[in-house]
Amino acid sequence: MSTAAAPPPKKVNRIGLEILSYKGSKTTLCAGCGHNAISERIVECFYELGVQPWSVAKLSGIGCSSKTPAYFLGQSHGFNGVHGRMPAIATGAMLANRTLLGIGVTGDGDTASIGMGQFMHLLRRNLPFIYVIENNGVYGLTKGQFSATADIGSVLKTGVINELPPFDCCALALQCGATFVARTFSGDKKQLTAILKAAIAHQGLAIIDVISPCTTFNDHEGSTKSYSYTKDHEEPLHELDFVPYYEEITAEIPAGETREVQMHDGSKLRIRSLHGDYDPTSKFEALRTLDEASRSGEVLTGVLYVDTTKPTFIDMLNMADAPLATLPESLTRPPKSALDQVMEELQ
Amino acid sequence: MSTTEVSPASPLSGESQQPVVNDFSIQVATVNGSGSQTANNVLMRSIFQMGIPVSGKNMFPSNIQGLPTWFTIRASKHGYIGRKKEVDFLVAMNPETAREDVQKLDSGAAVVYDEPLKLDAVRSDLHFYPVPFDKLVGPVCPEPKLRKLVRNMIYDGIVAWLLSIEMEEVHQALFRQFGKKKAKAAELNWGAAQAGYEYASKTFTKTDPYRVERMNETAGKIIIEGNMAAALGCMFAGVTVVTWYPITPSSSLVEYLIGYLKRFRVDKETGKATYAVVQAEDELSAIGMVLGAAWAGARSMTSTAGPGISLMSEFVGLGYYAEIPAVIFDVQRVGPSTGLPTRTAQGDILSTALLSHGDTKHPLLLPSSPEECFQMAITAFDLAEQFQTPVFVMTDLDLGMNNWMADPFEYPTEPIRRGKVLTAEDLNRLGGFARYKDVDGDGVGYRTLPGTEHPAAAYFTRGSGHNEKALYTEREDDYVNNMDRLAHKFESLRAHVPRPIVDTRPNAKVGFIAFGTSHYAVEESRDQLRFEHKFETSYLRLRAYPFTEELRDFIRRHDRVYVVEQNRDAQMLDLMRLDLDVADIAKLRSLRYYGGLPLDARTVTDHIVLQEGL
């Protein structure tokens, strides 16, 4: 008698890979940390879209958030750099190999304090790159000091009250040139997934500011970056549905009530507004809506802005189509005649 | 009419005055922003074209317009191209400094000056040639607003007559300087030079002894700035990603490079660039981009000066520890802090060799000449990729921004060396790899590039503690093993850096050690010591750190060894102390100059004469 059934076929994505190929090592962050949820969404999104793991470069700065690239996409090259300077490393990497899909993970300290300069210049350059800010308003690894995204009046566990106004990374991103700007919440699985997928499809700089509560240092009464505060104050702009280019449209959102943003690769981001007739292609509207939300204490989430037309930094540099990194010597060392010509001019 | 006033008691009156041929220096004192650079270059080139070894040094302020600038041209039949301390022939165009410039001259020097300055009243032991520049410029330059610029070309004509520089050579140098596109400007300036020449020939009686005579010592030579030479080296090294932040005196290196890349590195078929250049927001970002690009496989570089080196410190430590190639040019200027931004020094040696926190050390290449700027740029890229570490090329303002006579550069004969990079095929064969494992015994591991089409290609690069497999670790043994391997890697590098150039003289008890632009003063000083004091010396010219066995041997063969360098704290000597035995260290003496001007031979000679009791 045999009771053994044939093992169920392994579940694979459209390029034949199991989800295991997208996982990283075990997280060492605190239980319940918002960052872990974000890592899980990254794994799912890359798996579901069938992105080749070897085609991805994942980068980070320093801090709790910046540890996370070790916890997803184990078959992708990773680079955990120095504090606040991931944008520079990312820029170099993308110039060296324009075929890479780059994703960076950073925190609010990494981006809005020590790395503010590099962040601003990354925005200005519109590097094709996904930039995820895991925003919890505190420094975790150094045990709970305020960061520059902490809201006025937010209280630390020690009773210290933040008196300085926060930087709004999304507002900065809008003003300084990012072409995809979104805010979401690590606890909003559906929205985070749609935004990440759209960012993967976007050609240009995608800034995703994810409110990602720190369970250890900033999840208490009086904090404005806690789970309960964010849940109570989250105000989604719209419902989002990402339709990849290789799929038939079977959207959950009924047509007719939606806007549709056509991404570069042919994918579509379908948007059903919950907030009047919010137009995510208007930078002015995005800034105005963000400002209103911050005055009323709402955590406005969704795709604030998307521009699929602006040239990227790589486009502007008129670089060869093949990666610069592996161009043959015949293309990178001019012939002797070139040197002879220059020498003659100098005689 | 001659207005040269010579008192009977003056040393100038002696009829036995011998002509001084092809062995003097001219100093042109002007106001920066007045367009004198063109006139000065034409003057220098004219002498060069007459076959006479020549060098040009610009001493300029950190300012755009209105402050004093001095350009020194040295003609030397012996081929000395270092700075000569004494000025023999002054062209005083700057009212602000003219009196002081004249007061500094040695007796018997010649002075061409703007007549209203009345410099002949300052001293009576000089040869004065007053020129009414404003009167002369009017007829040759009808456009009043151009007169300020054209006026300078008049002194080229004056000096040409006084020094017997052939006007055909001035003509050629001038038209070459302006190029075909500015033919009209060239004609205007040529008119001014001729007016100067004519005025001098009609007005002056030559009383000074200085003049040139045609030689044949410059045939086939080029004149080039070190920054331009380094830029060419980078292009022929196959650089693909260049990042920079403007800073004097390194900016022109990247600016020249951009020019060459646009000219020679755009694929003719596709019209696409085989490179990327980014002007970064600061030096932190510049070096960060270099590391990101090199990590992803590009040949990447940046160029900076001392303040930039300080800012790059943290990233360079990452490059060292995470083992990422990088080429960094440090065109040194006077520090600390902002220091003297437009003056030269060799003051970043120690801080750069050990740049960043924790135990770090980095190879330094030390070019002395444009030829070496070119060659060592290529070597730097090869070493950086072969040893997966940041490599510094240490030049200085004198070498980088001044004009040097050089031999034409030789096209590289060796192919580009990309170091240990595993491909997907290699990984198929090997099954996998450990990024930081010392497989070959040289301390250098194998790396893969992002984008390599293989599931086992990826590894995780980090500046935090890591083991052979590039996994995070805080274990004592992992840390120590890794640091020891890095030290071993640095040892392996010793065999691959450029060797010193050694000239050991039999019976010489005293030796010199120098590097970079200090070479020219030492070379000339050795001759001064030989001819003036019958004192023979040996010489080792360092070309790289880490040091090689030749250094120890050289010190052991001599009783005393003078380490010549352009900084206050004997930085290179300090660096040697870390490597050498006590007995060897005891033989070292320090000879330092740190006034911001290129080191001159007389300063070196005077020091040795005093120390050695000659």
Image: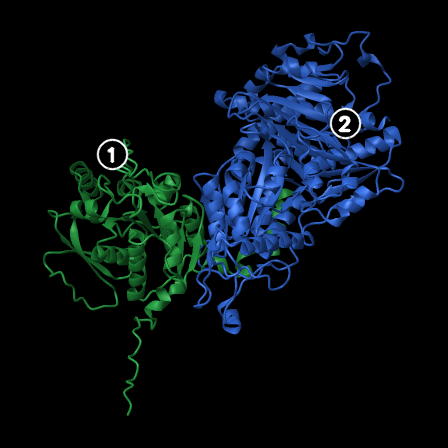
Q: In this view, does B457 lie above or below B271?
A: below
Could you tell me which chain the residue with mark 1 belongs to?
Answer: A
Q: Is residue A281 visible?
A: no
- Between circles 1 and 2, the one closer to the viewer is 1
- Residue A97 vs residue B483, the one in the foreground: B483
Q: Can residue B555 be seen in this view?
A: yes
Which residue lies under the disc numbered 2? B602
- Residue A125 vs residue A169, the one in the foreground: A169
Q: Chain B is drawn in which colour?
A: blue
Q: Please give the name of the residue rendered at 67% of the width and 45% of the height, measured from the top-left corner.
A: B545
Q: Residue A203: percent from the left, percent from the top?
A: 31, 55
Q: In this view, does B16 lie above or below B421?
A: above
Q: Residue B527: percent from the left, percent from the top?
A: 82, 34
Left or right of B59, for residue B423: left
Q: What label does residue A152 carry, if any?
A: 1
Report the number of discs: 2
Q: In this view, does A331 lie above or below B368?
A: below
Left or right of A92, for residue B370: right
Q: Residue B101: percent from the left, percent from the top?
A: 66, 17
Q: Colour of chain A?
A: green
Secondary structure category for the residue under label 2: helix
